[in-house]
Image (spheres, rainbow, N blue to C red):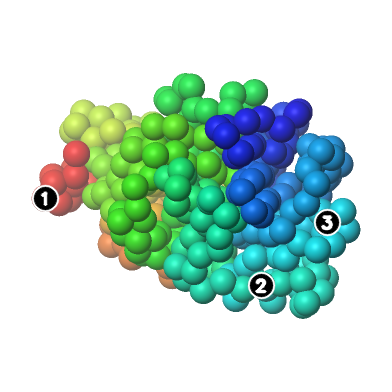
């Protein structure tokens, strides 16, 4: 794709990756993604903000073919999908300085073997003048690594946010046109890489409050030319109370655990609690992560296999522990054949979750009358606790 003008002397560069389906060999990307870089040309100097994923380097270099000089390569985040082409851009523009937060400098030296002499570090709030345009750098750790910063283009009231506020959608649109679609993609993105750092992100949101931001240009996805809604969405995901929702990731080998899950889901709905079921044998793990952004309760449906939890349920539990959602309550339902340590093993996998564990319901073989009665009680307890906390 050619470089595209956003407005006078500010351009989108980068690549639309229509094919990518997995990020970090972990995160599903059902809609592909983009790697956005931006060119800001001031009256005296020119800055390139971020680059692209290494396989897309030639595309970026082609977009820079008519650019005579680059004075600054701003690397807002050291992860290679944004920094990966810096060495090749430096080869083309050897006079350029790589502008980074102090933490990013060491990381880029380690990750890309960029020589120390190429860097200029900027402190939080520091500015660089391009002549009639000013770049102000704001340190915003953990969106999504500890070294990340964002850049405010003062005269144009534009925020370059890198991973922060981004979404994984491959599209030929330069600006957000389908807000509903972008909301879902941005939520998935938040859930998968930023949810664990909510406390720090809250501070970053606070920090941005004093800036008049008319446009947000992330490094993944489309540009927000009406950015209020994405800021509001982040406030809800980061600071909002959990919803009256139970996330039910489950796996069933011979149908018994499925019976338990379906019965529990039905009881919960009858009592006014929303549910989302995720059959882990085929689930999109990103959808589960999105549900965890809101769910007040998680109930894991798990059969016992080889004396422990089914590995798919163990994986979902480990993932929930890593994502550190706002969830307040957790329980386990499942079936076993003769014994095992399913509950103890899963309970040991959630040290990061600040949850109250509700009595699990385990049945031997297929569920019997007393097992369904236990599920009635569990559903009643969940509904009551959600009511007590005012979860809606
Ligand atoms: Fe888009 Fe954390 O890299």
Looking at the rendered structure, the number of numbered marks drawn on it comes to 3
* Helix, strand or loop for disc 3: loop
Question: Vertical placement of 313 versus 144: above or below?
Answer: above
Q: CA distance from mark 1 to mark 3?
A: 62 Å
Query: Residue drawn at (62%, 67%), measured in percent from left and top?
Result: 100
Q: Which residue is mark 3?
A: 93
Residue 143's disc number: none
Q: Nearer the viewer, mark 2 or mark 1?
A: 2
Q: Which residue is mark 1?
A: 388
Question: Vertical placement of 243 versus 327: above or below?
Answer: above
Q: Nearer the viewer, residue 159 or 326?
A: 159
Left or right, 369 with reference to 76: left
* Helix, strand or loop for disc 2: strand
Q: Which residue is mark 2?
A: 120
Q: CA distance from mark 2 to mark 1?
A: 53 Å
Left or right, 293 with reference to 53: left
């Amino acid at each position: 794709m050619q470089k595209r003008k956003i407005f006078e002397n500010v351009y989108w560069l980068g690549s639309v990756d229509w094919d990518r389906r997995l990020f970090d060999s972990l995160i599903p990307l059902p809609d592909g993604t983009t790697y956005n870089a931006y060119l800001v040309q001031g009256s005296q100097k020119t800055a390139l903000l971020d680059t692209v994923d290494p396989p897309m380097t030639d595309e970026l270099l082609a977009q820079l073919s008519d650019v005579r000089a680059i004075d600054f390569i701003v690397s807002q985040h050291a992860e290679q999908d944004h920094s990966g082409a810096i060495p090749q851009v430096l080869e083309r523009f050897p006079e350029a300085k790589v502008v980074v937060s102090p933490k990013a400098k060491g990381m880029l030296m380690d990750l890309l073997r960029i020589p120390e002499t190429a860097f200029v570090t900027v402190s939080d709030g520091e500015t660089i003048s391009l002549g009639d345009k000013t770049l102000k750098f704001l340190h915003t750790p953990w969106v999504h690594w500890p070294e990340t910063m964002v850049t405010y283009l003062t005269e144009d009231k534009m925020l370059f946010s890198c991973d922060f506020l981004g979404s994984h959608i491959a599209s030929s649109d330069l600006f957000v046109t389908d807000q509903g679609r972008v909301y879902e993609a941005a939520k998935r993105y938040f859930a998968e890489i930023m949810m664990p750092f909510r406390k720090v992100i809250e501070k970053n949101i606070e920090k941005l409050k004093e800036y008049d931001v008319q446009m947000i240009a992330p490094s993944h996805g489309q540009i927000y030319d009406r950015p209020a809604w994405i800021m509001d969405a982040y406030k809800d995901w980061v600071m909002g109370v959990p919803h009256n929702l139970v996330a039910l990731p489950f796996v069933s080998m011979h149908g018994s655990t499925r019976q338990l899950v379906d019965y529990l889901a039905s009881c919960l709905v009858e009592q006014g609690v929303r549910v989302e079921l995720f059959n882990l044998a085929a689930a999109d793990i990103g959808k589960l992560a999105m549900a965890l952004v809101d769910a007040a309760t998680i109930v894991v449906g798990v059969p016992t296999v080889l004396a422990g939890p089914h590995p798919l349920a163990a994986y979902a539990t480990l993932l929930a522990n890593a994502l550190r959602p706002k969830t307040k309550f957790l329980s386990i339902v499942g079936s076993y054949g003769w014994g095992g340590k399913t509950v103890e093993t899963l309970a040991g996998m959630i040290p990061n979750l600040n949850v109250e564990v509700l009595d699990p319901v385990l049945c031997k073989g297929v569920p019997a009358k007393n097992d369904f009665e236990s599920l009635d009680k569990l559903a009643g307890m969940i509904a009551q606790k959600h009511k007590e906390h005012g979860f809606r």
